[in-house]
Image (cartoon, helix red, strand yellow):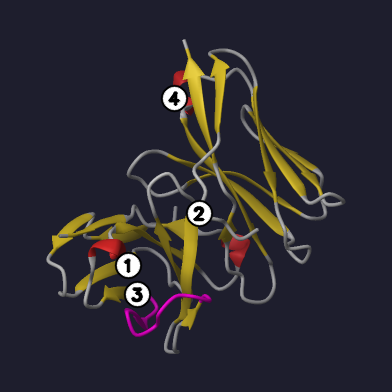
Amino acid sequence: GAVVSQHPSRVICKSGTSVKIECRSLDFQATTMFWYRQFPKQSLMLMATSNEGSKATYEQGVEKDKFLINHASLTLSTLTVTSAHPEDSSFYICSAILGTINYGYTFGSGTRLTVV
Amino acid sequence: GESVGLHLPTLSVQEGDNSIINCAYSNSASDYFIWYKQESGKGPQFIIDIRSNMDKRQGQRVTVLLNKTVKHLSLQIAATQPGDSAVYFCAESQIQGAQKLVFGQGTRLTINP
C-alpha cells in the first residue's frame, strides 16, 4: 500500500533555531500534502495544504512566515518551523493524497518537536 | 467539524463488550467521512470510511453509521479487545474541491479487563 515516510521522528532544538521536517511519498506521487499539528490530548489541527509546485494554502491563524512549507516535487514536502519557541513544541504529522481522495489519505508517522 | 482545544472525552468499556463512539460534524458540504485510530506517539491509522450516499458501512468488527440529517457519525466496535485501546477520531472531507481532511475532537477508548 501507499507509504509516507516522515523524518525525523523526534527532534529537540534550542529556542530561536529552525527545524525542518520532511515527508516523502515512497511509492506514489503525492499531488497534495497536508500538514497537521497535534498538542497533547487534543485533536489534529490542519495547518496547511500544499500542492506540488505551488504555494501552500494556510489555515486561518497559522503564520505562513513561521511555518514554511515547500512541495517542490511530487514525492517530497517539507515543513520548516522557523525561530522555534517552546510553544511550538508539538507533534507534527503530514498526510498525502494521490490526485483525488479515491485512493485515500496516507499519513506519516509524525514528528515530536521539543523546543528547549 | 473544526476541532477545538478541549481535552479528549473518555469511554471505558469491558473487554468483550461493544463500543460506540460518537462524532458530530459541522460542515454540511462534507460528503466523505473517515474514522481513525491513533495510538500514543503514532500517526492516525485508517479504520473505515463512508460516503454521504450511504448511511451504514461495515468492516471487520467495525460499523460506521452516518446520519446526515443531524450531522452525526458513529463508530461501533464489536467485542472490544485490549488492542482497541486508543484514541479514535472522526474526520470529514469533500470528494471534490480542496479535499482537506478536518478532524473531530476525538475520544479515548479504554478497555477494562
- The label number, if any, that marks residue B83 in the structure image: 4
Up/down of A84 relative to B77, above or below? below
Question: Given the image, on which type of amino acid does mark 2 rest?
Answer: Gly
In the depicted view, which residue is nearer to us: A87 or B109? A87
Is B86 one of the magenta-colored residues?
A: no
**Which mark is nearer the camera, 2 or 1?**
2
Q: What residue type is labelled 1?
A: Arg
Quadrant where the N terminus of chain B sits is bottom right
Q: What element carries label 4?
A: helix
* Dot label at residue B5: 2
To which chain does the residue with label 2 belong?
B
Q: What element carries label 1?
A: strand
Chain of the residue that carries numbered disc 3 in the rendered image: A
Magenta region includes residue A62: yes
List the residue tagged with mark 1.
A24
Q: In this view of the protein, which residue sits in the foreground, B25 or B9? A: B9
| Between marks 4 and 1 in the image, the one whose residue lies nearer the viewer | 4
Residue drawn at 46 percent across, 49 percent down:
A42
What residue appears at the point 58 percent right and 68 percent down from the top-left corner?
B100
